[in-house]
Image: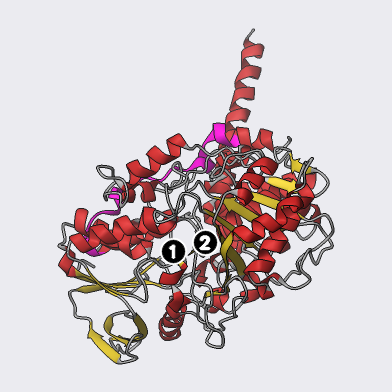
Amino acid sequence: MNKKWLKVGIGLGLVAIGAVYLGKKTGLLEDDSHLYDEFESI
Amino acid sequence: MQKKKAIMIGAGIANMAAAVYLIQEGKWRGDQITFYSLDDHGSNDGAPVDTVTDEYWNKNHPLENQKGYVARGGRMLNYRTYVDLMDLLSRIPSATEPGMTAEEDTRDFDAKHPTFDKARLLEGGKGIIDGGKLGFNNKDRVLLTKLIAMPDSEEEKLDNVTIAEYFKDDPHFFETNFWFMWETTFAFRTRSSAQELRRYMHQMIYEFTQIEHLVGVNRTRYNQYESIMLPLINYLKEQGCKIILNRRVVDWEFKETAMQDEITVTGLKMINTKTQEEEHVVVDGDTGVLFTNGSITDSATLGDYETPAEENMDYGAASSLWKKASEKFYNLGNPDKFFADRDASEWVSFTLTTKNHVLLNEITRITTQEPGNALNSFISTTPITPLGQKDVNMSIVVHHQPHFTSQKPNETVIWGYFLYPRRRGEFVDKEYIKMNGKEMLEELLGQLSKVDPGPVNIREKETEIYDSVINNIPVYMPYASALFNNRAKSDRPKVIPKHSTNLAFTGEFVEQPYQMIFTEQSAVRSGEIAAFHFAGIPMSRLVKTPRYDKDIPTLMRAAKKMFD
């Protein structure tokens, strides 16, 4: 039983790591909120 | 840097938008804003021919036929992406519909006339093509996915890469239905920037699933001048803005600093194009200068039914002034990238006016759709590109009628364009650029006859159609696609360049985060940014723009569509 949960845990962990990697690689997780900061009036 | 007055060089939609935001968000008075410009519409034109004879340009031949209408280009809107434009239109009254804002006017018209294109692509011998089949192979899918998946932070990898270069190992891409529709919907050419294609794929990714019907396209009630520019002009004049026309700003005066490390405009030299007199305007420390540094209709020339449009080799009014600034400062971009490569940017368009609806009804019969619903592109039946491939010969837009408020009920106005004007006609043996209005109509009738399902071919009504013509105005636009020209990210100045104390750049030739150009959206947003900067309004109050490229359901739908 414990082994089964371990496998599920590892599987979910790998999927999560994969999703984060893909998100970073493709810009899906890129923060664009600061992009207009350079145009602020001083 | 916060200012108290503004000088606008150019009176196109970008600077007019800036003025609206300065007044409404910055709480400025209209009289704090002065425009200097050759005209009050920029590229968003549309008018009876007899009112624009000064734009005809051909000094060697008079404009004989001054009847009918002309619009050098047209605009398809998109509410979901053009959020800044819709915000702008919601702030000003419609010029034609009493009691409505310009936004309500557009939404009202569009709701009553929703776009659903039934004949986006047509091909001789086949008739209407099913554009829903995008036609990709696996190589196309991989390259397109890589392009879409490239994050903003790596965009510079596509500096100076053309679309043709990006797909150099995959010429098949250029014979897909997807490319035929994408190139003619947005006016991309194979030599256009892959960087810009990426931005379009990001912002228009949801169009991917519906491009064959143009379902996401919204249209204004009338032409772009009367439905977009006129409301702006009326509002700004009412607010007390000074709009001084027939002025060509020809040179700058900048503050001299030891290292030329500060951009401060101190004066402008201009010519009154009516009197040819030179004028000088002092720019003081309280004044911001908003400069629209390029126009896709600069140096455009008109022809008429019997005369082709002559080629005007002028570099362009706005771009010439941009060049003078860029020669002085290192960070103001490279105008030559956009204005010294006509082969990559030129088009020819035409505006056909007829005195009855015979041609309109024939096009409706052949395309099976109502006027105002479509952009129809005719694919060649033989190879016509340097790669020996088929491509789109020409495209037409049959407007909802009337397209002009002064248009008579019996009249029809149709617009069309040739994306590659140096190609030879199929029915008139000369380059499109050398054709007069009558010959362009001949090409159109020839293309329609090839896709006509019959039983009575449109050719049977040819004489009747020619007899119905009031005018057909060809327009040569050397820089129509210049904003798509191959570029590096640093080739366009930022809206507020580094070290600038009072100069902002607006329009379609400026760099701003993730915005795609050739939309009213990016032009309006550039004006909004400049206005917020000079009025001291935080950028956090800019209209929020959607990022469909980060929306998982949209991406999933696009991925599925790639396999249709």
User: Furthest residue to the top?
Assistant: A1
Graded by Cα atoms within 10 Å as few (under 14), some (14 to 19) or many (20 or more), the crowding at tag 2 reads: many
* Element at label 2: loop
Please give the label number shown on residue B294.
none
Q: Amino acid at mark 1?
A: Asp
Q: Amino acid at mark 2?
A: Gly
Q: Is residue B119 above or below residue B506?
A: above
Identity of the residue drawn at 75% across and 73% down: B430
* Element at label 1: loop
Q: Which residue is mark 2?
A: B73
Q: In the image, B256: left or right of B387?
A: left
Q: Chain of mark 1?
A: B
Picture quarter with the N terminus of chain B: bottom left
Q: In the image, B158: left or right of B406?
A: right
Q: In the image, B309: left or right of B37?
A: right
Earlier-in-chain disc, 1 versus 2: 1
Closest to the observer, B272 or B137: B272
Residue B33 in the image, given as x and y percentages of width and height? 21, 69
- Circles 1 and 2, Cβ within 8 Å, touching? The answer is yes
Q: CA distance from mark 1 to mark 2?
A: 7 Å
Q: In the image, B319: left or right of B414?
A: left
Residue B204 in the image, given as x and y percentages of width and height? 55, 46
Span shown in magenta: B534-555
Q: Quadrant of residue B526?
A: bottom left
Residue B173 shows up from this direction: no
Q: Which residue is mark 1?
A: B45
Q: Is residue B57 above or below residue B207?
A: below
Q: Is residue A27 magenta?
A: no
Identity of the residue drawn at 60% across and 58% down: B468
Closest to the observer, B443 or B454: B454
Q: Chain of mark 2?
A: B
